[in-house]
Image (cartoon, helix red, strand yellow):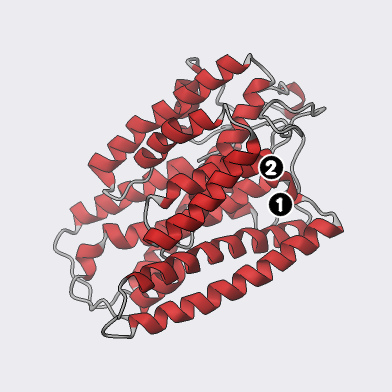
Amino acid sequence: MTTPDTVTRPAAGDRPGPAPAARPVRYGYLDVLRGVALCGILFVNLRDLLYRWTEAVGPHHPVFRFYDVAVQGRFVPVFAFLFGVSAWLLYSSSQSRMPVRSARWLMARRFATLLPVGLVNLALLYSGDVLTMYSVIALVLIMPAMFLPRGPVLALGVVGTLVAYWMWGNSPLIAATLIVAGFGAAQFGLPQWLESRRRRDVVVAAVVFVVSAGAGVVLSLMQNAILDTDALSDPDVLDRVDGFAGLCTAVALTTGLSLLYRARGGQGDHGGQGGRGTVLSAPFSLLGRTALTNYLAASAVAQVLLHLFPDTQLTTPWWLPAATVAILVVQVVASAVWLRFFRYGPVEWVWRCATRWQRVPLRNVPQRSRSPRA
């Protein structure tokens, strides 16, 4: 869920390998995009967690319809895809510091140590946890992908994603193909392309945004019309329309935000501190850098609310998006304060220590005394 602090640029050859980059790079846009995806996911998760409070409200309320048509399935694809991208960036960076075999063992430990975190979240906080699934997918699919050329990996991820959406719509199983697609796309330089300000790259991003956004809007309107229909001749139609609407919206979200990021002067930072923040991107960057901690914390907050007010029954769900925004604001402030003194979120730091089998420095140090490989 988090990108490494510093990474080397992907290799130009067909096989995965460390790039001959002159100095390390952090892709600040990935933090921003991850933060935006986290916001969307928390809207859906908190609706699921606090469903007991709105049992008296009919499922056709405008707020719930908006969630179904504009939020559900629109942000999870981005989150899963970024998990694969981050896996490649860490793997590529690790190869510049250690033998390939050691880098693969490090990645295996990273995925394996995420599993207990997911299981705890699944058992205690949120039955819809994705961390357990991501961990298993990475161990089963990403580890073998490290031995394959980048071309087949990307092809399998993209084709598999399209087939999965056609077969199952917005199924959680699609996370597997999206993670593989992200792992392959990162090897072709997607993180750099999303921050590139070259005219050709900006034009391509703009075209992809317009096409995917248009398709996403049309499919979402179709989904809304289908939901208004009492009977369907083919029940799978809704799943397919919903799934592809979510996929197109996720692509539009990724490319559209990248255009804003480039236009506002955002770019990767050489030295591990992230891209230059703006008023619009800074809050999402903070959420993105502590995404794992905030993901778990939101579920914990919901469980506390359910225990404090077990018999609450609200007649309107309008409070739900308001409460989610309030939680996100608190998380932005808390993340800003925390990252002022520390380099990683608390859960991210524990995960990193478990991955490396050593205590990783946590406190921030002045830039001039920071090691390039910290």
Q: Given the image, on which type of amino acid does mark 2 rest?
A: Tyr
Q: Where is residue 12 in the image (x, y as percent from the top left)?
A: 77, 34
276, 1: nearer the viewer:
1
4, 76: nearer the viewer:
76
**Badge 1, how many Cα within 10 Å: few under 14, some, many 20+?**
many
Above or below, comparing residue 319 to residue 88 in the picture = below
Measuring 44% from the left and 30% from the top, which residue is drawn there? 111
Q: Do the residues labelled 1 and 2 touch (CB within 8 Å)?
A: yes
Q: Given the image, on which type of amino acid does mark 1 rest?
A: Leu
Q: Position of residue 175 (x, y in %)?
A: 44, 48
The mark closer to the camera, 1 or 2, is: 1
Above or below, comparing residue 268 to residue 221 in the picture = above
Measuring 43% from the left and 30% from the top, which residue is drawn there? 139
- Read off the residue under disc 2: 27
Q: Is residue 349 among the parts visible in the rendering?
A: no
Measuring 54% from the left and 41% from the top, which residue is drawn there? 84
- Read off the residue under disc 1: 194
**Badge 2, how many Cα within 10 Å: few under 14, some, many 20+?**
many
Secondary structure of the residue carrying tag 1 is: helix
Above or below, comparing residue 297 to residue 106 in the picture = below
- Determine which of the numbered discs, if any, sits on residue 97 in the image: none
Q: Position of residue 371 (x, y in %)?
A: 71, 21
Secondary structure of the residue carrying tag 2 is: loop
333, 286: nearer the viewer:
286
- CA–CA distance between discs 1 and 2? 9 Å
| Quarter where residue 123 is shown | top left
Q: Is residue 216 left or right of residue 236?
A: right
33, 287: nearer the viewer:
33
Q: Earlier in the sequence, mark 1 or mark 2?
A: 2
